[in-house]
Every structure is written in C-alpha cells, then in structure tokens.
Amino acid sequence: MLEQQANLDNTALFEHLWQITKEMRQKIDARFETHPDASTQSLHSYAAQVGAAHGSLNTFTGAEVDWLVHSWLRDPISGFSNMHLTVWLKSHIRVPHLACAFSTFPQLGILFYMDYIPRTDLFVDLEYLDRYYEPVNQTYLALQGDSRFEPFISKTLYIRQAQSHTSLCYTFQEEQETLALVSKVAHEMVDRWLSWIDTAAPVAESERAALAERDLFVRRTIAERDPDNKVAVRFFGEEMTDKLVRSLWGGDRILSR
C-alpha cells in the first residue's frame, strides 16, 4: 500500500490523533510521577536517512510505572503514521497494563487499537476476567455492531494471542462522528483503568519477582514480533529499527526496574 500511494498529506488527521494520545497522557501524568529514561534521548527526534519519514520516541519510569512509551512515527509522503501510548505497571499490583495505538494507512484509513493487557491466565482466573474485562465488553460489542468500524484481525498469530477478547481493534474512515466516538472511548478506557489502580490490592512480596519477569517477557515479545517492524525497516534500516524496538520494551534502559 505504501508503494501505491504518494503525496498524501494527512497532517491535520495525524495531529488530531496525536492530540488524543496527549490528552490521555495528561491524565496519566496527573496520577503518576515518572522520569524520562536517558536511553531514548537520541530518539526524541529521529529521521530516515532517505525520504521524509521521521518520528519521536519517549520513555519513562517511576515508582509505580515500570515502562511508559509515548511515541509517534510518520511518513508525510505516503500518509503512513503510527503512534503509541503504553503504560506497563510495576508488580506491586496486578491491574492490567494499558495499551493504545493509532495508525493511518493509505487506502485502509485509520486503525484504532486499545486494550488492557492481562497479567494472569484469563482461562482460570475468572475473578480477574470479571473485574477487568466484563466492564469493557459492552463497548466491544457496540463497536462490533457499528458498521462504520471494521474489525482488524492481524495475520500474525502471536499478535492475536496477545490481545484480550475485549481488545478494541478496528479500522474506520475519517469522519467527525467516528473520531469523536473513538476519543470518547479512549478516555473512558483510561479513566476506568486509573480507577482500578487506586483500589487495587497489593501483590504479595513473594509473587512480585515472577510477575515482573512475566511482564517483561510479554512486553519484549510483543515489540519484537510486531509485523509492522518491517515497515520501519523500509524507512530507517535494520540498525535503527532494532534500536526502536529495543526502546519499546526497555532493552537499553538506564533507570533500574
């Protein structure tokens, strides 16, 4: 699709979607104290050696947050863009992690993804399933039944495995009504998640190391198996793409876990 499309300026759309992520980030910053990790300082602004693609990747950590990523990447020529806001909690509580992404693709439109990343086995931990996933089930079903939104099903097995059964992952066309609905849903997801954190029971000290190890494995595997990494290679080459991927999971982090 990138090869078939040229000179597609969607700057206004990109800025609108990025603004939604910034609004969510403001709510998160109001709840958590985090500090920038210097390992990604060189990625605060980066660009392709050839072409117009460029981006910004910022990472943070704190007393309650193990790894926060707020990033964007875009190619103003083809119209492709991708932006992330993900918050991986520390192992003091077992509240799911928060993941949000927007992408714009030539011909496909806008991709919206938002999910609570589980930290336990939902097949057997039914209390966890009911507490954290039942509340979003009606939103999931409403979007499934809305003809303006097309479910996006990844061809990559692990990516489908990494999504919960209430994962909001849809493509849609740029319209005032659809953008307003997505913004509303995104804020509801963040508000609900923050309310859980304030009432979460602490994880036993003896269980925290194993939970932290599981979290890191999941975060690293999602980053390394993302099929869109191939798009980044086209823009930035293997070496820079490897650095970007490591930054998503904290492979070069300086601040300790």
Image (spheres, helix red, strand yellow):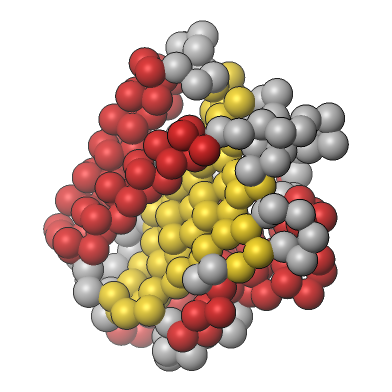
Q: Residue drawn at (78%, 75%), measured in percent from left and top? A: 239
Furthest-top residue in view?
A: 147
Q: Give the x, y percent position of residue 170.
A: 54, 28
In the visual, does 103 lie left or right of 181? right
- Is residue 125 something that shows in the picture? no
Furthest-right residue in view?
A: 3
113 is higher (above) or lower (below) than 138: below
Q: Quadrant of residue 32?
A: bottom left
159 is higher (above) or lower (below) than 233: above
- Report the number of discs: 0
Q: Residue drawn at (69%, 53%), measured in percent from left and top? A: 52
Q: In which quarter of the image is residue 92?
A: bottom left
In the visual, does 252 lie left or right of 50? left
Nearest the eye: 150 or 233: 233
77 is higher (above) or lower (below) than 5: below
Nearest the eye: 96 or 15: 15
Nearest the eye: 165 or 142: 142
Q: Residue drawn at (18%, 51%), measured in percent from left and top? A: 195
